[in-house]
Every structure is written in structure tokens, then in C-alpha cells.
Amino acid sequence: MKPIQFNFNTSKEFYNELKTKVKDHFETNNISDKGNRHLYSKTIILFVAWIAAYSLILFVAQSLRAVIGSYILFGLIGGLIGFNVMHDGGHGGYSKKKWLNQLMGYSMNLLGSHLSFWQMQHNVLHHTYTNIDQYDDDIDSRPIFRFHPDQQRKPIHRFQHLYFLPLYGLGIIAMMFYGDYKRYFTRKVGSMKLKKLSLGQHSLFRGTKVAMIAIYFLIPALFVGRWQALLGMFIMFFAMGVVLNTVFQLAHVLEKTQMKSHIDFRIPEHRIVHELQTTANFAMGNKVRTWLLGGLNYQVEHHLFSHISHVHYPKIAPIVQEVCAKYGITYNSYKTITQAFISHIRQIKYLGQHN
């Protein structure tokens, strides 16, 4: 598909001042823009908790209720690893060391999916073409959902504000057991063709899927029984999917954010302004949510500076707000996660019932 061109001749002064002030923040405070001891200690806490939850499944859970509860806990902690560790590593923000970023990014494979596919979908398509139909794969869930005005509206979409949450959970299951394989065999992610995979990449993909079945089903089945482990695995992925997909959609499919359409493969704004128009924050200043969500409640800062670790977003957010205010550029934000969630419901309800 033909790439879209942004108008980099506009908003140059705004972009240069924003970059300079954020850079000055790190230089003035003599700190790196990558991860720090807070991120590294969080990584240890999350992986220890993940192993502990897995141990509950294998050695503690006796009843079906305990097995399911342990699997849900296991999946939710896995989601937190995705938010905090994998996401920073996959963007190169976890560390100055490339190998450490790759290692943390490959926690995606430990969770059952494939890092290189995610990087193409997320880093390339989503971060470059945010909220542009047929380019941003994160808003392309046809025919089940209609997330963009340019997408065809079907009768079922009238009810998407009612069925979205369980299908967000099923979305992860579909990705693990269908979407990844489709990408692997078609060598295509969304609208982008993948480069030819090396022998090592082929082996990594196959090994990831074998390990996923072994870790989440075969090994637990030896301790809790086959059908209990199978049920637990799917409920685990379902819980993970509800959390992951909801958090990511709360940044872009909202009443305040814009859905963009290209004209002859051109967008009239600078790409940085485009990101500000299509992205929103929520629950800024809530330290607990920021810790748990890996700074993904600061999606504006993340989309502007994805190479910077999420641990710095609360500090650079006031800088971004100040520069936006100076140049009259809207900074989208919701005070609470509840407000963002309600806005998401209203937006998908509107898209499902209006052309």
C-alpha cells in the first residue's frame, strides 16, 4: 500500500521547541531518557509475581475455582509485564543497551505472541498512521467492529457498544491461535508486507508457539488435569485480552480524538500534530494507575516520544502541555479512567449507529 505523506513544512517551530524542551529536561537533570532503577525493580517484582502465580496453578490450586482464579491472576500479571516491560523494550526505551531492549521485548514471545509481528503492527503502522483507516491496524477489526467513519457500517455494529468488552477478550485468543499464524504464512501485517524471515526467525516463531502450549496447557495439565488446564488457559488469555485491548483503545477511539482520512495519500498536518489530534491521556497524576499500566495513561507523551521510557512521562507531560498551549494545539486528556471508558463507549456507540 502506498505510504501516506505528512506535511512536515507546517508546525516546524512547535515541533523544534517541543523537542528542545524535552531534551533540556533530561540534560538539566542529568538523567537518561531510558529506564532507571524504578523500572528495573518493577521488572523484578512483576516476573517474581508471574512465577508465583504460575506456581499457584501447579502446586496450590486444588478446586476448579482455584485453578481458574490462579489462571486469571497469572494472565493479568502477564498483561502488566506487557504494559511495563515488553512495551518499553519493544520501543527501545527500556535501556541504552540494544540487547537488553530486545530481551525485554521478547517477553512478548514468553506471553505467547511474536515480537517482530507486534513491532510491525504497533511501532510502524499504529505509531506512524494513528487512526487512519486501512493503515492503522489497531483500529481495523472488521467486520466485528466499526472504529472509523470510513469503515462500512453493518447492522451488527448497532450493538457494538454492548458486546465490545467480551470480544476484546476474545481478540487476544484469536491473535494467539489464528492471527499470528496468518501473519506468519502470508508474511503480511495489516497493509504491510513482511521481509523474508530468516531461519532463526522461523525457528523462534515455531518455538514460541510450542512453548506457549507447553507453559499454559501441557505442564499445568499434569498437575490439575487436561480440561481444567485447557479451560484455564483460554480464560487466562480472555482476561488478558480484556485488559490489554481496553487500555489501548482508551487512547485513540474516544470522543475527543480525531479519526483521520487521507486525501490523495496526504495528511495536511505535521505528523507530531497528527499524533496529538488522534491520541488522549487519562488518569494523569494517578501514580497507582501509572505504575500498573506502564505509563500507558500518558499515551500522548508516548506517541510523541516513544523511544523514552514510560517512567519519565509524568515529568515531561507538563512540558508538552505548556508548549501545546503556547501554540494553540489541543492536548487531549480525561481526568479519570472512568471518564475515558465512558467516552470510548459513547464513541463506538455513535460509530455503530451513524454513518
Image (tube, rainbow, N blue to C red):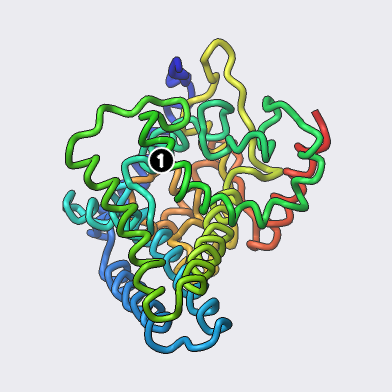
Query: Is 174 on the left or on the right of 86, as rendered?
Result: right
Residue plotted at (34% across, 47% down): 114
| Nearer to me, 316 or 78 | 78
Q: Mark yes or no: residue 218 visible.
A: yes
Count of residue discs: 1
Decide: few, some or many residues near mark 1? Use Cα within 10 Å; few <14, some 14-19, many ≥20.
Answer: some
Residue 95, how many percent across, how many down?
A: 23, 56
**Quadrant of residue 243 within the rendered picture:** bottom right
**Quadrant of residue 316 within the rendered picture:** bottom left
Query: Is 138 on the left or on the right of 258, as rendered?
Result: left
> In the displayed structure, would residue 185 be above or below residue 227?
above
Residue plotted at (47% across, 30% down): 190
> Which residue position is annotated with label 1?
181
Considering every residue shown, the one lying at the far top of the view is 264
Q: Mark yes or no: residue 14 visible.
A: no
Q: State which quarter of the image contains the C terminus.
A: top right
